[in-house]
Amino acid sequence: MKQFFTVWLLLASVLTTRAQSPCLTYPTPGLYSYTVPPGGPFLIAISVRGADGGGNGSTFNRKGGSGTRVNASFSVQSGDQLTVIVGRVGGSDFDFGGGGGGSAVILNRSGTLSLLAAAGGGGGGSFYYGGGGGQGLGTATGGAGGSLTMNYAGGGGGGGGLEGAGSSGAPDESPIRTAGGGSQARLTAVSPGGSSYYNLRNGGPGFGGGGGGGGSPASGGGGGGGYGGGTGGGSNGSSQGGYSYVSPLGSSPEIIEGTAGDSQLQNGLITFDFPLAITQQPISSSTVCAGATVSASVSASGSTLTYQWLKDGAVLTGVSSATTATLTLEKVQPGDAGKYRVVVKGFCGSDTSSVFALSVNPVPKPTLSSSGLISCANPSVTLTAGGGNTYSFTGPGIISQDASNGTALVDAAGLYSVIVTGPGGCTASAQTNVEIKSSCVTGFELIHTTSGQVLRTLSEGELINLATLPTDQLTIRATTSPGAVGSVVFSLSGNMTYTRTESAAPYSLFGDDQGNYRRWTLKPGSYLLTATPYLGAAGADLSGTPLTLSFQIVNQTPTGSPSVISYTLMNADTDQPIKVLTNNEILNLANLPSNLNIRSNTNPATVGSVVMILNGQQTRSQTENQPPYALFGDNIGNYKVWTPAIGSYTLTGTAYSGTGAGGQAGAPLAISFRVVNQQPAARVSAEAGEDLEVKYFPNPFTESFTLQLQGKGKQPAMLYDAYGRRVWQAQETQPEQLIRLGNDLAPGMYLLQVGQGETARRYRLVKTK
C-alpha cells in the first residue's frame, strides 16, 4: 500500500541538538515526499538503510542477511522534491524467508529525476543456508532466481534492480510453489516483492522488491532488492543481498555492507539531517564609550535558523535585534557591559556562539570657566577646565595651554572649546565665551607696504623724512592691547584729513587685503593721528583708550658730500638688523646670533660707493658699490657671514659719490668696539646703570618672564625676535610686570630693549618652547 506524506522544514517543535537523533526519520516502509523549504541552498546529510532479509533461523540459526547502509551529504535547493522509498523486511516462515526490499532517496529538481542514494536489502534465509547481507556498489540489473535443490525443492526468487525485475526461482515439482522474483526498482513508486507459496515467504517491497522464498522446506531464500537485485538461494548456496548506489553529486560517501545471517528482521530506514554550524563567531570583545552604538554578528549554516542573544546567561529582552544574527545596541551605558552569546537554532539542532565581551567606559563631564574679562590692563585671561585626565583647547586667541592641568592662557575675545579625555579614553567637550572689558591702542608703526616689515616705531613729534626712507610704499599700523579687538577707528587731521575703520587685524590706517597693506601717498606737512579701539566691529560697542600721535612729514634731500652716518649690526642668517652700533660698544657674543655682519648707513641712502676698513683682532677692507653696504659683503641683500673673534676693533667707513671709491669723498666715520663672550652668571639677571636697574627672570623662559625696573620712572620696553621683528611692546612698564608670550612664539633667541635712544638697554633672552 502506497503512503504519501509531505514534510515541511518549518516545524518549530523539531529543535533538537546536533548530538541527538537526526531531525527527520522515516522508519516505516512506504513512499514519502519531502519539499525543501525557502532559505536554501542547504547541505543535507542523508542515511539510507535497506531492509533485512526474512528467516529467523529457528532450527539451525540460518537467518536472513542484514541490509546495507549508505551515508552521504548532498546540496539541495529550496523547492527541490525528495522522494523517499523505505523497504520492508522480507517475509519469514521459520528458517525460510524472502529478500528484503531496497531503500532509496530520489531528487526531483524542476521535473528532472536523479537517484541520490540507494541501499540494497538483505537476502532471505533457508533451511541449509543463511541469507547474504546487503552488498556495496554493483550493476543495476535484476537478480537471478535460485537453483533447484537436490530433492527438487524450488529455489528463491531474485531481487529487483533499477534496470530489471528479479527472476523467479527454479520451479518446484508443484508450480504454485515456485518463488517469484522481486519487481523492477522505480524512481517514483514502491516496487512489490516476489511472491511465495501461501505468501509466507514473500519478498519485501521497496526500491526493487526482494525475491520470494522457495515453496518447500528444502527451498532457498529470496534475493534482496535494491539498485541491483541479489540472486535467490537454492542448491547452489545462500541468497545474495541487493546492491547499493551513491550519486556523484554526493560528498563524503560511506557504504556499510550488510552482514550474512545477521537479520534482525528490521525494515529499511532513511534519515535526513541538516547540519547546523556557526561559521563566523562574534568579535571577542569591544570597549566603547557610553553613548556609542555597538554591533556583534554571527554567521551560521543550516535550515530555518532562529537566533536568541543572551546577556550574562539570561535571555536579552527589550532589544529588537536580540532575535537576529546581528545584535545592535544603541547608546550603550555602563549597565550594558557584560558577556553576550547567541543561541542559533535550526531544523536539526542548535549551537551557542563564543562570548562577545562588552566594556563601556563612562563619558567625562567637563567644566570650563574663565578667570575674568580681557582688558587693556589685563590683556590675557586663564581658562580652567576640569572633569578629565587630559585637555585640548581651541579658540581664536590661545597663547599657551597645559594639557595635563587643564589651563589655557588666551588674549582674544570669542568662543573657546575644550575636549576633555577621561580615564578610559572617552571624550566630551565644553565651551565658554571670553569677553573684552576694555581695550587700548598701545602704539603706531611705520610699515613698508610691499614687504610688510616695520620700518620704525613712531614716537610723539616724529619727523619722517621721505628722502631718507628706503621706499615710498608706506602706511601706519596701530598696535592694541589685547592684540585683537573688535575694531579700530582712525582719525587723521592736518595737511590731509582721513578717517578709516578697521574691524580685523592688522589695523592699518589705509587698510589691507588679508594682510597685504595698501599704499599711502604721503604729503609733506604736519599731522595729528588718533586711533580708538572698540569692542565691537565697525566702531560699535564700548570704546577703549585711544592713542594720539603728532608727527611731521618732510621730503628734504640731504645736501653736501655723501657720508657714512652710522653702522648697524646685522643678523646674517635672517638679514635683519640687530642694533645700531655706538662708539666704544661692547658686543657680547653670548647674547648675539652666531653669524653676523655690519652694514654702513649713508646719507643719502644710496651713494656711489663705500669703503670700509676694519682693524684689530681681525682685519678687512671692503668696497661696496651698491646698497646694502656690508663690511663682509652680500649677495643681492643676502648678507655673508662674519663670526667675530674676541678682541678690540676699529671700523672706519668713507662714502664716495662715484663707484670704486671714485668721485667726491665724504667725511669718514670711525667707531671703536670690543667683542667679548661672557655667559650670564645666573638665570636671574640684573644690570645696574647710573640711574636704572633692570632685572628679568627666568632666563631661559617658556611662556612668560618677569621684568623689574628701578629708577628713572616708567620706561618703554620692546621685544624683538631673531629676524628683528618686534613681537611685543609696552609704552610704559610697571616697576614689576609679568610679560606673557604663550606658545604662539617659536623657541629661540629674543632681544629685550628697555628705554630708547642712547640710554636704551638691550638683553638677550632665550625661549625654550
Image (cartoon, rainbow, N blue to C red):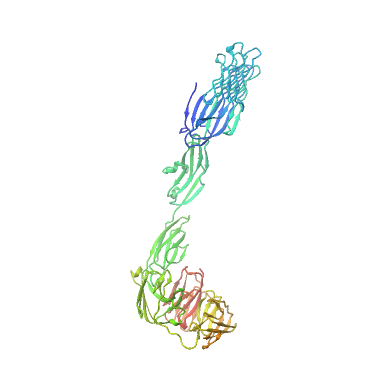
Asked if one can make out residue 680 in the rendered structure from this viewpoint, the answer is no
Asked if one can make out residue 396 in the rendered structure from this viewpoint, the answer is yes
Residue at figure coordinates x 51%, y 28% from the top left: 83
Q: Quadrant of residue 372?
A: bottom left
Residue at figure coordinates x 46%, y 40% from the top left: 308
Residue 480 sits above or below residue 555 on the image: above
Position of residue 622 measured from the top left corner of the image (x, y, whole percent) = 57, 82
Residue at figure coordinates x 58%, y 13% from the top left: 177
Viewer-nearest residue: 29 or 183: 183
Q: Quadrant of residue 736?
A: bottom left
Viewer-nearest residue: 712 or 4: 4
Position of residue 10 measured from the top left corner of the image (x, y, whole percent) = 46, 33
Position of residue 407 measured from the top left corner of the image (x, y, whole percent) = 44, 64
Residue 311 sits above or below residue 250 on the image: below
Position of residue 549 measured from the top left corner of the image (x, y, whole percent) = 38, 79
Q: Residue most toward the left?
A: 541
Viewer-nearest residue: 390 or 92: 92
Residue at figure coordinates x 48%, y 88% from the top left: 560
